[in-house]
Amino acid sequence: MEHDNRFPSGEWHGFYLEDHQPRRGWMHLYLSFENGRIVGEGTDYVGPWNASGSYEVQSGVCTWVKQYLGKHQVQYQGLVGKNGIQGQWKISFVAGEFHIWPKSMGYLNELYMHEDLTQAPPTVQLGTVPSDSVFI
């Protein structure tokens, strides 16, 4: 198990943004961080998936591949900060942004879900979290 508290193994939440979707693509994840390796599983509106990749404690860079069961792969690359991991996902020539965080940061669930329910379509960009919660 990783000793750096920015990489807690266990339940994570988050979303990804797609140009063709007016709302966030919510994800429920179970991730394990150990010896520079990320492994996990989760689900979103596309279906269940497995994840495998790596992370660097010093730089905070995280990369992994999300493999949907019986479907396509998605590449993720992000940077860990005080509010989880933010970065970009990519499928061949299509890309977008994502943000995931440990379950213990439930206030982010409330913030983003509130925005999803009160804005149509959402105009919020990644990183618009409370001003006292700054990344990296």
Image (cartoon, helix red, strand yellow):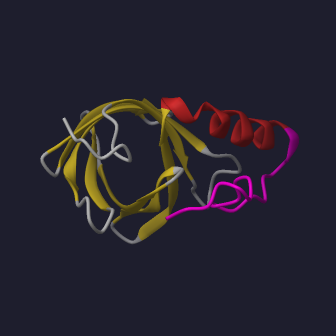
Dividing the picture into quadrants, the one containing residue 15 is top right
Which residue does the image show at 70% across and 42% down from the upper left? Answer: 112
The answer to whether one can see residue 17 in this image is: yes
Q: Is 81 placed left or right of 23 in the picture?
A: left
Residue 111: x %, y % from top left: 73, 40
Q: Is residue 123 above or below residue 15?
A: below
Which residue of the protein is positioned furthest toward the left in this rendering? 35
Expressed as whole percent of the image width and height from the top left, the position of residue 41 reads 29, 31
Would residue 111 appear left or right of 8 to someone viewing this image? right
Q: Main secondary structure of the magenta part?
A: loop
Most extreme residue toward the bottom is: 93
Residue 56 % position (x, y): 23, 61
Q: Is residue 30 magenta?
A: no
Please report the residue visible at 56 percent of the width from the left and 36 percent of the height from the top: 105
What is the total number of numbered labels drawn onto the structure image? 0
**Horizontal side of residue 118 vs 134, given as left or right:** right
- Magenta stretch containing residue 120, yes or no? yes
Q: In this image, 126 relative to 120: left or right? A: left
Q: For the point 50% across and 30% down, which residue is it?
A: 103
Q: Residue at x 33, y 62 (%)?
A: 60
Q: Observer-nearest residue: 29 or 96?
A: 29
Q: Quadrant of the N terminus?
A: top left
Q: State whether residue 80 is above or below residue 1.
A: below
Q: Which residues are magenta?
A: 118-136
- The vertical placement of 130 against 60, above or below, is above
Q: Is residue 48 visible?
A: no
In this view, the residue in front, 90 or 55, is 55
